[in-house]
Image: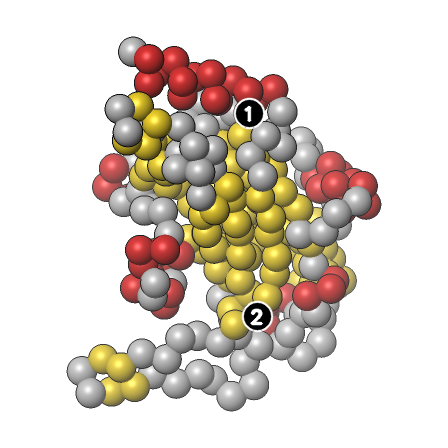
Amino acid sequence: MKSVFLVLFFLSACIANAQSLKGSVKLEYRPSPLLYVFNQSTTNKAGSPGWLMVKVKYDMPNRKKGGKEIWLDDITMETEVLVPGSYKSKNVTILLKGKTIFWSIPLNGKSHLATGCIPPQVIARFARKGSKIEISKMHARVTFYTSSRKIIMRVYSSSGSRIKGYFKKIDGAVSSGILTVNDIVMPRNKTPWNVINYELYDVIKPDSQR
């Protein structure tokens, strides 16, 4: 009962202040990892910009009961990336979205890592020129929710009120000139990075358990 109280107390504090959990997010391009399967190696397409990686770090508090960490179940990480793009020969702002549902996260007082991954084909599809969009022209927002849709963390790829203003415009009714593409920021377990450094990341909830 005490452990339940501690978790509820922690969540209540986070809900009162969406920045209670400290974290950060940055964007970068990375080529697909080269793998060797059945004596065959994979290759990267020449000229590909690589995957657009949304790299997230989040710091969990230290909460224990009986010497063992308390765990939070069913935390959802929702990722949104605003990019300047082109669609049907018109320049528009593209909102790329995706989510990762974590099976369970320990309150162990450590920094945790997560990634959202956007395939290179998606970037090439919407790029206004060539096959790459400059990182400096994109903006990301990552929000962590409890199973009851309460915010416990929200971070942006850059500081200041300007980037928050961009996202405030898309909250609620989506304005004209913005094309939303859902479920295209893929969770790590749906990408080639699924088996790389597996134990450095929190377990993603299997589709069968959702």
**Could you say where residue 93 lies in the image, as x and y percent from the top left?**
72, 55
Q: Secondary structure at mark 2?
A: strand
Going by the image, does 112 lie left or right of 92? left
Q: Residue at x 54, y 80 (%)?
A: 48
Q: Is residue 76 visible?
A: no
Q: Position of residue 55 (x, y in %)?
A: 53, 56
Q: Residue 173 occupies which quadrant of the picture?
A: top right
Q: Which residue shows up at 30% across the image and 23% down it?
A: 65
The crowding category of the residue bearing disc 1, from other C-alpha atoms within 10 Å (few below 14, some 14 to 19, many at least 20), is: some
Q: Position of residue 159 (x, y in %)?
A: 75, 47
The quadrant in which residue 207 appears is top left
Q: Using a 10 Å C-alpha cutoff, classify the residue at mark 2 as few (fewer than 14 neighbours), some (14 to 19) or many (20 or more).
A: some
The color scheme shown is: secondary structure
Q: Mark 2 belongs to which amino acid? A: Tyr
Query: Which residue is nearer to you in this view: 40 or 58?
Result: 58
Compared with 2, 172 (above or below) is below
Mark 2 and mark 1: span between their CA atoms? 32 Å
Q: Earlier in the sequence, mark 2 or mark 1?
A: 1
**Which of 209/11 is in front?**
11
Q: Residue furthest front?
A: 67
Query: Which residue corresponds to the image point at 60% horizontal and 19% vertical from the top-left?
Result: 16
Q: Is residue 158 visible?
A: yes
| Quadrant placement of the N terminus | top left
| Image marks 2 and 1: residues in contact by CB distance under 8 Å | no
Q: Amino acid at mark 1?
A: Cys
Q: Secondary structure at mark 1?
A: helix
Q: Quadrant of the C terminus?
A: top left
| Figure disc tally | 2
In this figure, which residue is indicated by the disc labeled 1? 14
Q: Residue at x 59, y 30 (%)?
A: 20
Residue linked to disc 2? 29
Camera-side residue of 66 and 152:
66
